[in-house]
Amino acid sequence: MDKISDDQVIEKFVKHCIRQRRSENTIEIYTNVVKFFRRFLNSKRRHLVDVDGMENKDLLEAFMDHLRDNGVRSFSRYNVCFSALNHLYSYLEYDGVIKQNIVLTVRKMNLKSYKKGAAPSKRKIIDVEKMSRFLNSIINLEDKTICTVLVKTGFRLDELASIEVNEISFGDNSITLKDGKFYKRTNLKAYFDEETERLLKRWLARRKMIAKPGESALFLAESGCQLMAPGIAYHITKWAAQFGIHDKSSERIEDRFTAHNFRHCFTTYLRQAGMTREYIGELRGDKPKEVFDIYYHIDHRDLRKSYLSSMPKFNVY
């Protein structure tokens, strides 16, 4: 096969991720890592397809040093980078562009000792009282609604960004996501309670005044068009930093509060209220992990009732 350019590699890789139904957020992260790696290789007058076979392992090892020199210290950050590169080179090997993907071998040899020496990191969880104060510290109605919906539903960032107005039902206070769009999600239906209902209705009344004709997205940018995941992430961390729970300059995951922290809080609150793991997994949209989960069918009437009795109130105003 003729050698292909870096731009062609990235274009093919993105299309592959889309075919696999990877989330928009995952594709963005993977693409950014690959582009960062490409710039590193280009500085050495090498290209993405040159990382082929163990005779080229020095390129990956040098990249690890490059990450460290650029301030990457946590194992989780290294892991994200190498997960993205492994996905890229697994695809290139499958497509016949390279002969051997060596990413996992190099990662195992060089990162194992780093992981053993690193303290395990946990995402920040704030209690119900502090979450209440945080939500009420957000002045902007749309941003307050976004954060409330996240903590009340456990949605991932890309799932939230995709919500359209017609996917909201005030009959049973639920949101049903589009089928076939999310690689990680099984159950597409999430519920919300009365205080979330009040916020959503207030936001929908405001939304009518700023939405561009024909725009169906629930959350909007200043232009009146859909507010994409990166924009939502920016707004969340802005308010979290202002409240004092997010330090963007820190490499430590426990010092940051992002959209995904709401999903951890959602899970924690429900578990603390006594909800079963099966019900929590269903609400989170987790894929079945055991044979029992595949054959066990949850009654959504019971699920909704359990959710409403377990989800705490934050007295959002």
Image (cartoon, grey):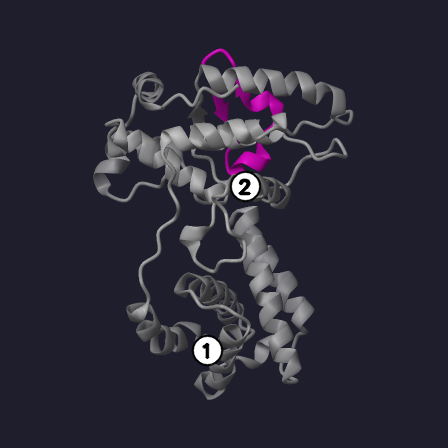
Which residue is nearer to you in this view: 234 or 190? 234
- Secondary structure under tag 1 reads loop
- Secondary structure under tag 2 reads helix
**Mark 2 surroundings within 10 Å by alpha-carbon count, few (fewer than 14), some (14 through 19), many (20 or more):** some
Q: Residue 13's quadrant in the figure?
A: bottom right
Q: Residue 115's quadrant in the figure?
A: bottom left
Q: Which amino acid does label 2 sit on?
A: Asp
Residue hosting label 2: 158
Residue with the most extreme top position: 171
Magenta-tinted stretch: 158-180
**Left or right of residue 98, residue 255 in this image:** left
The earlier-in-sequence mark between 2 and 1 is: 1
Say above or below: 214 vs 104.
Answer: above
The answer to whether residue 269 shows anywhere in this view is yes
Which residue is nearer to you in this view: 52 or 198? 198
Q: Does the magenta stretch include residue 168?
A: yes
Where is residue 253 shown, x and y percent of the image? Answer: 43, 54
Residue hosting label 1: 100
Instruction: Give me the residue at 54% from left, 59% from top.
Output: 30
Instruction: Give me the residue at 54% from left, 41% from top.
Output: 158
Image quarter in which the N terminus is found: bottom right
Cα–Cα span, label 2 and label 1: 33 Å
Instruction: Give me the residue at 37% from left, 73% from top.
Output: 111
Q: Is residue 5 magenta?
A: no
